[in-house]
Structure formats: structure tokens, C-alpha cells
Image (cartoon, helix red, strand yellow):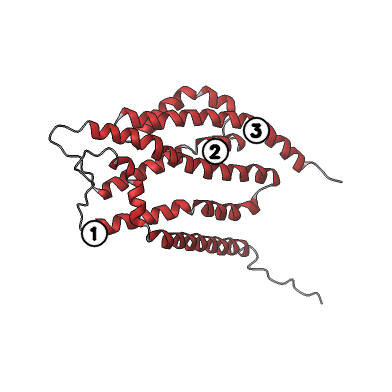
Amino acid sequence: MSKKPPVQTSLSEMPLVAHLTELRSRLLRIVLIWMLIFAGLFYFANDLYTFISEPLRAYLPEGTSMIATDVASPFLTPFKLALISALFLAMPFVLHQIWGFIAPGLYKHEKRIALPLLASSIILFYGGMAFAYFVVFPLIFGFFTSTAPDGVAVMTDINSYLDFVMTLFLAFGLAFEIPVATVLLVLAGVVTVTKLREIRPYVIIGCFVIGMVLTPPDVISQTLLAGPMWLLYEVGILFGSVLRPISRDTEAEDDSPTA
């Protein structure tokens, strides 16, 4: 009498459950590291705000200062800055956790390219923020404060200023990711390098449109965002044209039969 094969009802569900469990554990690690960094930064929250507001305070007219129009702003604004700064500082760990989650599903040739792209994305994001702080902020704040009408004292609210600079930090940080995005599109076969060169005029116009949407309504800040975006797009085309042949060779090597 033959035995009936065991019923395997949960085999198809196990991979999904395992993936969800791993995703939850990685998200918890991200939140834990974020909160630990925030706990260390909170004590220096006021010093952080002093540093972040220096580009504006350097151009305030003599006898004026920044102001807090809400009752809780003197506490909540540095608190929010410390929280956001902790997330920015935790970004390498966040991306590392994302990499650890998706890496098992990648081929060898994909891992060889993905890891450098991951490191490049971190460096470029921080580079965009540094460009905004050291180059963009002094120019636009110098321009804004110099155009105030007579009889108007420039006294910016601390919460409004924080929202303004965080928007610019995010805009420039993401804009500096254009080379990584371009290379990924080329490597994935979504678009070719030739096509990217053909649509260059439309991309330039799109850069200025994005600069107009993400930055204040002045030509200086719009140009300071659109110009680097265009240059970074050209860098992406350059690296895409170099990495595409390399990726094909490594793919053929990994897929070649072995003895």
C-alpha cells in the first residue's frame, strides 16, 4: 500500500513570510539607529540651528535678528531640526539595510555594479546638501536681504526658515542623484545612451522647470539648481556609456557555462 505524499500547504507562503519578517527587522533597525542618533543630537539642537541659520544671519541688517512667532517654536524648531538631521546622518545605514534586503536577489554582475552605485548615491546626496549650504544659501540670502524695501526690517521666523532650507537641502540632494539614476536606466535597458543624447535639449528645459518649481521664485536659485542638474546629467551619460559595455561583459562571463 503506497503512502500518500505529505501535503505541503505552506511552502509557497514561507518565502513571503520570511521576506516580510526580514523587512520588518530591517525597518526596526533603521528606526532604532535613527532614534539613537537623534538622542545624541538633541542636546546640541540649539547649536545645530545656530549653524544651519548662519548663512542667513550673516546677511541680516545690523540690529535685527531671527524671530519666533509661535509660542512653542523656540523648542519645537530645534527639535525638528535634530530629528531631520538624525535621519540625514543615518542615511548610509538606511541604504545599507536596503542593500542587504535586495542583494540576495541580484546576480553577481548586478552586485558588482550596484554596490558602487549605492556608495556613489550617498556621496552625491551629501554633496548636494553641501553645495546648497556653502554655495547656494549665501547667494540667495544675500540677494533676498538686499532687495528689502525701505522701512522693512528683515526678521525671518525660525520655523519658516527651517522649512525653507530643508526643502532646498532635499531638492539639491535629490538633484545630485541624477548620475546614479541615469546609469541605472541605461544598465536596466530602459533607455540607451544615444537616446539620452538625443533628448538633451528637452532635459535642459526640464532642469530649469524643476528648478523653478523646487526653488524660490528668483533666477539665481533656479539657475544654481538647473545648472548642476544638467552637468550631472552629462556625467550620467558619460558613465552610462562606459559601464554598459562592462556590464555586458560581466553578464556574459557569469552566464557562461563552467566545467
Q: Which residue is mark 3?
A: 244
Q: Residue 20, percent across and down?
A: 55, 62
Check contact, mark 3 vs mark 1: CB within 8 A: no
> To which quarter of the image does residue 190 belong?
top right
Mark 1 vs mark 2: which is more N-terminal?
1
Q: Residue 89, percent across and down?
A: 47, 52
In this image, 71 relative to 116: left or right? left
Residue drawn where x is 22% and y is 31% of the image: 147
Q: Nearer the viewer, residue 110 or 34?
A: 34
Give amino acid for label 3. Answer: Arg
Residue 245: numbered disc: none
Instruction: Give the answer, above or below, for where 11 lies relative to 86.
Output: below
Residue drawn where x is 67% and y is 68% of the image: 8
> In this rendering, which labeled residue sits more in front, label 3 or label 1?
1
Residue drawn where x is 46% and y is 63% of the image: 36
Give the distance between the C-alpha atoms of the residues marked 3 and 2, in whole angstroms.
13 Å
Q: Residue 13, percent across and down?
A: 60, 64
In this image, 169 relative to 187: left or right? left
Q: Residue 19, percent across and down?
A: 58, 60
Specify few, some or many for label 1: CA neighbours under 10 Å numbering under 14, 14-19, or 20 or more: few
Residue 180: numbered disc: 2
Instruction: Give the answer, above or below, for where 33 lies relative to 117.
Output: below
* Residue extending farthest front: 62
* Residue extending farthest right: 259
Locate the N terminus and report the quarter of the image it occupies.
bottom right
Check contact, mark 1 vs mark 2: CB within 8 A: no
